[in-house]
Amino acid sequence: MAAAESPPPALRDRVLADIRHIRQLPAPRQPAPTSPAPESSHPRRWRRAVAAAVAAAACLVTAASVTEAVREHQRMERADATSRAIASVLSAPDAHSAMGRTKAGGTVTVVASATRGRAVVASSGLRTLPASNAYQLWLIDRKGPRPAGLLPHNRPIITETWHPSEKLAITIEPASGSPRPTTPPVVLLKP
């Protein structure tokens, strides 16, 4: 449905008058000779190698950043899950606590819930141990002690399981933990 129209007669004169004020672009560079000298190919190869190295480095930095972000996200998810589990025990209607002074200085507080089947253990003022040792938590019943994790410094720990018949003990063990207690308990509590 479009129809062609002739341009107005003054348009040609206006374009020719305005063209004087438009800056002209430089002519495009001519291609290199078809048979370059061996010296001129080296800079081109060098530039390609540098560009490839920069691209590879950028990929490595991106991969490292993404990996670190994923790890941080996973760490935050674990911390959030632990916080929810601790809150669940502390707010349980049957939660009850026990507190005791330790032979290593400071105190240990235990809050346990039979309905949740877990116990939360927190310490305050415990003597700092050398890097080769750690405080280890034990759950003790008629069958004897079983490991329940290493007690982090200034942070609570939640046991995976806990039964009302069990006592909680803390010993000083090697930094990586021990399958059986190797020292007398610094505290023994019955929540």
Image (cartoon, grey):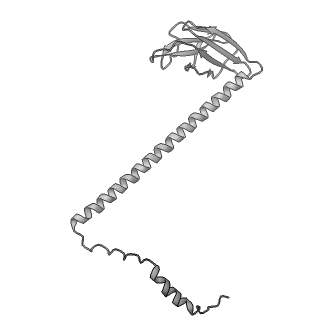
**Which picture quadrant has residue 118?**
top right
Q: Nearer the viewer, residue 11 or 124?
A: 11
How many marks are shown on the rendered structure? 0
Q: Nearer the viewer, residue 149 or 10?
A: 10
Q: Position of residue 77 (x, y in %)?
A: 61, 35
Q: Is residue 144 visible?
A: no
Q: Is residue 9 visible?
A: yes
Where is 13 relative to 72, above or below? Answer: below
Where is 118 relative to 18, above or below? Answer: above
Q: Position of residue 93 (x, y in %)?
A: 78, 20
Residue at 47% across, 46% down: 63
Q: Quadrant of the C terminus?
A: top right
Q: Is residue 92 left or right of residue 66?
A: right
Q: Is residue 92 left or right of residue 21?
A: right
Where is 151 relative to 9, above or below? Answer: above
Q: Position of residue 14 (x, y in %)?
A: 53, 87
Where is 57 relative to 82, above or below? Answer: below
Residue at 48% across, 18% down: 175
